[in-house]
Amino acid sequence: MPFTTLQLKSSDFQNKEDKKTIAVFEKLLSELSNRTVPASIEAFVNECIDRINSSVLPEKKRIRFVAKQQALILQRVEKELKWVPKNHYRFLFMLFGMSGIGIPIGVSIGFALNNMGLLGTGFPIGMAIGFAIGISKDKKAAAENRQLDLDVL
């Protein structure tokens, strides 16, 4: 069962960012159609496309709605099939590194030197560690063919 056709086209919009949002959504649909997708995911994607096609929102709110539907589809695909877009783990672990690793490092440096102004020194250290972990997980996902040829950000 093929995916429902999206009635919105990127050429329908004047704003560059709006065009990009629609183009990324179309790219997501083409990526999913090139792979073998279970019927439950296919039905969910078709339901999201139907919601987009039937919405009567103004242009700006419609773009936000498309982005939300895209996020829902990506979450479902990641949860059930473990497929992720490019650089997914890099961004995820970069944030985790800053908050989960960088803050404790900064606090320990601040306490060790008795200067809590050095708290911020842990952020770049944690960010670099998280970045490295994320890149390795992205490479692993690409090697296992679990990475979609799609750059969301």
Image (cartoon, helix red, strand yellow):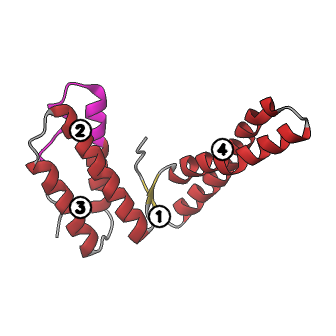
User: What element does badge 3 sit on?
Assistant: helix
Q: Earlier in the sequence, mark 4 or mark 3?
A: 3
Task: Look at discs 2 and 1 and give the one toward the viewer.
Answer: 2
Task: Verify whether residue 10 appears in magenta.
Answer: yes
Residue linked to disc 1: 146
Spot occupied by residue 67 in the image (x, y as percentages of width and height): 29, 44
Mark 4 vs mark 3, CA separation in Å: 34 Å
The span from disc 1 to disc 4 (Cα, nearest Å) is 26 Å
Please report whichever mark, 4 or 2, sits nearer to the chain's N-terminal start: 2
Amino acid carrying label 1: it is Arg
Kindly identify which residue carries mark 2.
63
- Marks 4 and 2, Cα distance to the nearest angstrom? 31 Å
Q: Quadrant of the N terminus?
A: bottom left
Residue drawn at (38%, 59%) of the image: 75
Front tag of 3 and 2? 2
Few, some or many residues within 10 Å of mark 2 (<14, 14–19, 20+): many
How far apart are the two marked residues, 1 and 3, measured between alpha carbons?
18 Å
Which stretch appears magenta? 7-23
Q: Nearer the viewer, mark 4 or mark 3?
A: 4
Magenta segment's dominant SS is: helix
Q: Which is nearer the eye, 55 or 136?
A: 55
Residue 98's tag is 4
| Residue pictured at 64% horizontal, 56% vertical | 136
